[in-house]
Image (cartoon, rainbow, N blue to C red):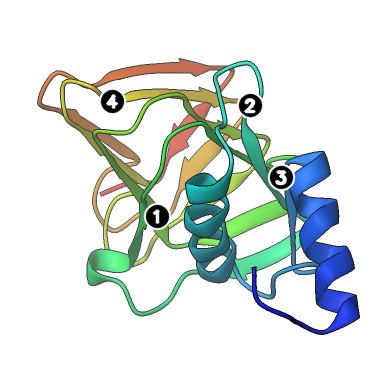
Amino acid sequence: MRRSHTFFDKYWQSVMDQNIIRVPQGCPTVEKAMALAEILSERKVYTETDPLKIQLDSGVHEIVGYEEGRMDVTCSHITFVGKGKDQTTVRGGFEVEDQQHINFEALAVTNEFGDGWYVRGSETTVDVLKCVAKECAQDGMIVRGGATVTATQCDFVEAG
């Protein structure tokens, strides 16, 4: 790694040690956390039992600038975890293609432009736990192309 500011060095080491990216405390947006996750995944191997967590604080988190409002999940072994489906809301959706062991826990997804989750690809595995997809312009979740999804204690309301 190149020389960088000492604050960033401490932050970087903390993320590498704890496997947690905090939004908005460590990264201001979900998109920037995903970009950081890509970089970290190139430097460290995450696994099903030791995933990288993107921890979303209470409140509303906007996903902007993506087709149909869905952000691409671009690496495997990632867990997006909120503070509860009544406390953490993601305005936008997630697209997962050919990634393994992607987890979503304790959050609400609402996408005025499209689907809450769009999951596809025969290699794709996604677990959704204690989440809600609501007020989506299209479907709460679409699963295609042989993807495997397990949704436990989830609600899908007011979609498409």
Pick whichever, 133 or 63, lies toward us: 63
Q: Is residue 153 visible?
A: yes
Which quadrant: the N terminus? bottom right
The local crowd at label 2, few if under 14, some if 14 to 19, many if 20 or more residues have their Cα within 10 Å, is: some
Which mark sits nearer the N-terminus, 2 or 4? 4
The alpha-carbon separation of the residues under discs 3 and 2 comes to 10 Å
In the image, residue 37 lies at what x, y percent? Answer: 55, 54
Which mark sits nearer the N-terminus, 3 or 1? 3
Disc ID at residue 66: none
Which mark sits nearer the N-terminus, 3 or 2? 3
| Kind of residue at badge 3 | Gly
Left/right placement of residue 146 relative to residue 133 reads left
The alpha-carbon separation of the residues under discs 4 and 3 comes to 22 Å
- The residue drawn where x is 42% and y is 54% is 135
In the image, residue 127 lies at what x, y percent? Answer: 48, 22
Q: Which residue is mark 4?
A: 124
Left/right placement of residue 9 relative to residue 67 reads right
Kindly state the secondary structure of the residue where label 2 is placed.
loop
Disc ID at residue 93: 1
Which mark sits nearer the N-terminus, 4 or 1? 1
The alpha-carbon separation of the residues under discs 1 and 2 comes to 16 Å
In this picture, is 75 found above or below 130? below
Left/right placement of residue 119 relative to residue 145 reads right
Where is residue 105, by image quadrant? top right
Q: Is residue 113 visible?
A: no
Left/right placement of residue 134 relative to residue 37 reads left
Disc ID at residue 82: 3
| Of marks 4 and 3, the one in the foreground | 4
- The residue drawn where x is 16% and y is 21% is 122
Kindly state the secondary structure of the residue where label 3 is placed.
loop
